[in-house]
Amino acid sequence: MKISVLGSGCATCKKLHETVEYIVKQNNIDAEVEYSTDVTRIVALGLMRSPVLVVNDKPVDLRSTSEKDVKEAIFGVSH
Amino acid sequence: MDIFAPIQWFADWLTYAIFSIAAGSPLGNSVNFFIYDSIKIILMLAAIIFVVSYVRSYFPPEKTKKLLSKTKYPIINNLLAALFGIVTPFCSCSAIPLFIGFVEAGVPLGATLSFLISAPMVNEIALVLLWGLFGWQIALIYIISGVAIATIAGWILGKLNLEKWVEGFVYQVKSVEKAIDKPTNRDRIKYAKNYMADIIKKVWLYILIGVGLGALMHGYAPNDLLAELAGSDNFFAVPIATLIGIPLYSNAAGTIPIVSVLIDKGMSIGTALAFMMAVTALSLPEFIILKKVLKTKLIFLYGSIVGLGIIFTGYLFNAIIK
């Protein structure tokens, strides 16, 4: 599994990256986590918000950046 | 009837009956003001943010981008962009992807800048505080001036053909057309509820601090304290208030309650409006974020034109509302 956090480098983006790292570690998910501040990648996906969570090359809709919602989003893809 | 009467009743009861502080004393005035204003503002904030976010769920940025890239009339385009700036969900985190997305879709630079000026300036927190503390008339004046400044500033910047002051890579980005999801009514309500909780969690402390400082001044500072310093007769009050507003961005929620008291103490409305607009629209952190896509010259010009617009609005309202 490949998880990317794309952001503009803002506080919310860094927080999301930390949350993802934490969830992956806690649940022993076999995933490669990447954090990128290359905003052009967000636009290339047709999106205009930040941060964006990308799982296996697909952007995931996040209800919020809370641990619970991020976890649900990641598990929603992996199961 | 004043729908906030029950809150006033509660504040009176708590201050005078429970805390048994003498009515009319400075301490009594301060405590009463603090209880009444903080409850009222937080309730209004919750209600209005809920409504605004619900409306916003109909205007995802991807849709706004599409609409704006189709209209090609110069100043109307700027006006539309400024209006969309109010209803499109926005946070300074998203400023860069929004900017690139708009430019990539063929939205003119001027209209994109109109959007970027109005989005942070006419924000729901500022609106709620203005409405709650000064009445809906001032809130409306604030929206109209904000839209006017964003429209005109973006239009001028668009006329100057400044595309060369935008970082080159912006024009190389290629986007894909993404299908816009159609959320159900339940999704929208859920989104609005989440967003409301998020904002309240983020700002309640600033509001309490702001209202607390305001309450202290309300009870203890003399009534004409600022009449000379920041009244409408002081020519320099407006530009100085605008400059002071620039570094205060992150504390918009805390600043406005203080301003409401400053007006009580003699600051003129135009000066106060200029100050609040500067707090929300001219934000240092946002300028730094924009540096990723705009050359420093353009950011400087953008800040100066918006700043002049704000100063002009300040003088205008000082002249109209005495």
Image (cartoon, rainbow, N blue to C red):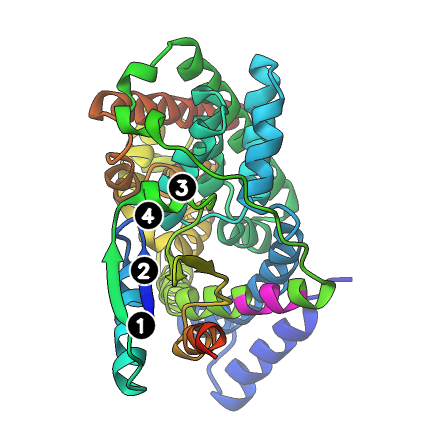
The answer to whether one can see residue B314 in this image is no
Q: Magenta stretch: residue A74 in it?
A: no
The residue identified by callout 3 is: A44
Q: Are marks 2 and 1 in contact (CB under 8 Å)?
A: yes
Q: Which element is circle 4 on? A: helix
Q: CA distance from mark 3 to mark 4?
A: 30 Å
The residue identified by callout 2 is: A5
Q: Nearer the viewer, residue B103 or A56?
A: A56
Q: Residues within 10 Å of mark 4 (few under 14, many from 20)?
A: many
- Estimate the x, y position of residue B21 in percent, counting from the top left: 46, 82
What's under tag 1, amino acid-wise?
A: Val
Q: Share a chain, discs 3 and 4?
A: no
Q: CA distance from mark 2 to mark 1?
A: 8 Å
On residue B34, which mark appears? none
Report in which chain the residue with disc 4 lies: B
Q: Are marks 3 and 4 in contact (CB under 8 Å)?
A: no
What's under tag 4, amino acid-wise?
A: Tyr
